[in-house]
């Protein structure tokens, strides 16, 4: 069977969660965390290699809580996203305190990824359908510049406890992405959702719109794109203390320049995530319901 990898981005600081390691919070029976469900669904879909992107200072806790368990059921490798992992000649600006975003997170896997791969956030629950669709797309061995993205429905991705950022997608008649509009401060309303602008104005959003939840299906050649693009990004934005090299912006740039195309794979599954501390109980309740329905065993592995 051809290798298809899952890259799990778990290096986030989790500032809105009060500084805790939110990726390692238990949400299911027998102490399961959100990552357990993503990995369970990924392995069920056919993925056979997991690459965790973590911070070096998190390694010991991460291995104890999840890594050692996962190594018993699948091939596991680790990449480390570090602030000072920069191209030759690049200088870390004084005052920079956080890594450089999701593009750098995936670039940290450059020596580990040689096969098609999917990318997910560690603290998001995506559902079984998304993993199946992304795996099936990658298993067909798409051309080097043919990617895919799980397209969630906006109303299925909102938090009751605060605003969120979502990539609002425009799609052509053949189901390919035309644009990803990274939209911040999206708030759930009784009728759907609105985006709050800094000047106090609001933009009403279509609750049925497709959105990106950073679940991409990519080819190994995408690593070359990241390697070439990161030095350019640093040259243009490296002195900005909060600038980030972000996957949605990188991929959107490739779409606009005609260098890549991205198939949107619609999923109706409900997204769950712990964006805010208050979200945890919602996730716990949702996982309990799915377990009761038979979607998951109480003990996921073993």
Image (cartoon, rainbow, N blue to C red):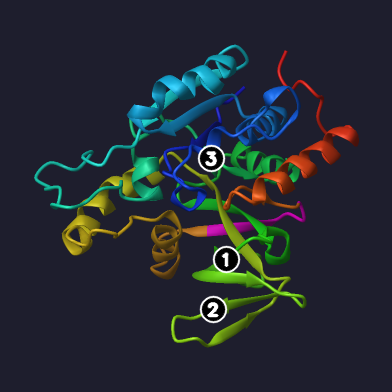
Q: Position of residue 243 (x, y in %)?
A: 29, 60
The mark that comes first in sequence, 3 or 1, is: 3
Q: Position of residue 4 (x, y in %)?
A: 56, 31
**Which of these two is toward me, 3 or 86?**
86
Q: Which residue is mark 1?
A: 163
Residue at screen point 60% across, 57% down? 263
Quadrant in which residue 262 is drawn = bottom right
The mark that comes first in sequence, 1 or 2, is: 1
Residue at screen point 14% across, 52% down? 93
Crowding near the residue tagged with mark 1, few <14, some 14–19, many ≥20 C-alpha atoms within 10 Å: some
Q: Position of residue 213 (x, y in %)?
A: 58, 55
The reply to whether the C-beta atoms of the residues labelled 1 and 2 are less than 8 Å apart is yes
Judging from the image, what secondary structure is the residue with disc 1 in?
loop
Judging from the image, what secondary structure is the residue with disc 2 in?
strand
Q: Which mark is residue 22?
A: 3
**Which of these two is toward me, 236 or 265?**
236
Q: Residue furthest left?
A: 89
Crowding near the residue tagged with mark 3, few <14, some 14–19, many ≥20 C-alpha atoms within 10 Å: many
Judging from the image, what secondary structure is the residue with disc 3 in?
helix
Quarter the C terminus occupies? top right
Crowding near the residue tagged with mark 2, few <14, some 14–19, many ≥20 C-alpha atoms within 10 Å: some
- Where does the magenta region start and end? 262-269
Vertical side of 226 occupied by 253: above or below = below
> In the image, 134: left or right of 127?
left
The reply to whether the C-beta atoms of the residues labelled 3 and 1 are less than 8 Å apart is no
> In the image, 240: left or right of 287?
left
Q: Which residue is mark 2?
A: 196
Does 138 appear in magenta? no
For marks 1 and 2, give the CA distance.
Answer: 9 Å
């Amino acid at each position: 069977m051809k290798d298809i990898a899952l890259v799990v981005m778990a290096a986030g600081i989790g500032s809105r969660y009060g500084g805790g390691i939110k990726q390692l919070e238990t949400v299911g029976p027998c102490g399961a965390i959100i990552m357990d469900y993503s990995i369970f669904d990924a392995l069920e879909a056919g993925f056979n290699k997991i690459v965790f992107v973590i911070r070096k200072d998190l390694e010991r806790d991460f291995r104890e809580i999840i890594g050692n368990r996962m190594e018993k059921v699948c091939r596991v490798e680790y990449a480390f996203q570090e602030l000072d992992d920069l191209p030759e000649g690049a200088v870390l600006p004084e005052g920079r305190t956080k890594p450089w975003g999701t593009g750098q997170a995936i670039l940290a896997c450059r020596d580990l990824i040689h096969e098609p791969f999917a990318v997910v956030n560690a603290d998001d629950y995506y559902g079984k359908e998304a993993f199946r669709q992304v795996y099936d797309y990658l298993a067909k061995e798409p051309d080097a510049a043919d990617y895919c993205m799980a397209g969630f429905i906006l109303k299925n991705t909102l938090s009751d406890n605060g605003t969120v950022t979502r990539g609002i997608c425009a799609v052509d008649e053949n189901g390919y992405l035309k644009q990803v509009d990274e939209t911040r401060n999206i708030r759930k309303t009784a009728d759907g959702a609105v985006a709050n602008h800094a000047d106090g104005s609001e933009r009403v959003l279509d609750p049925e719109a497709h959105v990106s939840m950073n679940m991409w299906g990519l080819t190994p050649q995408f690593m070359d794109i990241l390697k070439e693009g990161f030095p350019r990004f640093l040259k243009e934005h490296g002195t900005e203390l909060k600038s980030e090299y972000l996957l949605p912006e990188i991929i959107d740039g490739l779409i606009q320049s005609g260098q890549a195309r991205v198939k949107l794979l619609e999923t109706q599954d409900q997204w769950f995530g712990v964006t805010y501390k208050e979200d945890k109980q919602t996730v716990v309740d949702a996982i309990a319901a799915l377990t009761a329905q038979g979607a998951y065993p109480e003990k996921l592995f073993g």
